[in-house]
Image (cartoon, rainbow, N blue to C red):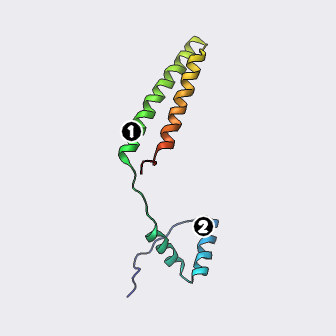
Amino acid sequence: MRANTNKLNFYVDDDVKKKLKKLSKESGLTMTAVITKLIMSYQIQPLKTEELLRIYKELNHIGGNINQIAHIANSEWHISNDKINEAAKLMNDIWQCVRSYGRDT
């Protein structure tokens, strides 16, 4: 009896197909066996829900601050250097949030 009883159909681009065929040929395994071995030996990390929620909230607050600065700039047709620097700092904070995701593994 066959161990593999579930058929899956999916699409890959040309580069992935070439690499899969190459791995199959080099290893002497079928493409199914190559995919199965790759999947079974790869550790997939679960999403860090709490960390994502914290980042989402922080980005939401930063976005609100940037919107306030934009509103002032649009209503006064002028924006001070302090406000420009504040907006730049907030954008830097956003990038730090994004870059920090996943580092606390």
Which of these two is toward me, 71 or 47? 47
Q: Where is residue 6 in the image (x, y as percent from the top left)?
A: 40, 75
Callout 2 touching callout 1 (CB < 8 Å): no
Q: Mark 2 points at which residue?
A: 16
In the picture as drawn, the residue positioned furthest to the front comes out as: 104
Q: Quadrant of residue 13?
A: bottom right
Q: Residue 73 carries which label?
A: none
Label 2 vs label 1: CA separation?
35 Å
Q: Nearer the viewer, mark 2 or mark 1?
A: 1
Numbered label tally: 2
Q: Residue furthest top?
A: 76
User: Residue at label 1?
Assistant: 54
Q: Which of 42 and 21 is in front in this view?
A: 42
Tell me if residue 44 comes above or below residue 84 in the rendering: below
Quarter the N terminus occupies = bottom left
| Place of residue 93 in the rendered image (x, y in percent of width and height, measured from the top left) | 50, 33
The percent position of residue 22, horizontal first and vertical second, equals 62, 76
Measuring from the top left, give residue 94's x and y in whole percent: 51, 35
The amino acid type found where label 1 is placed reads Arg
Give me the residue at 50% from left, 41% from top: 98
Residue drawn where x is 42% and y is 38% of the image: 56
Callout 2, which amino acid?
Val
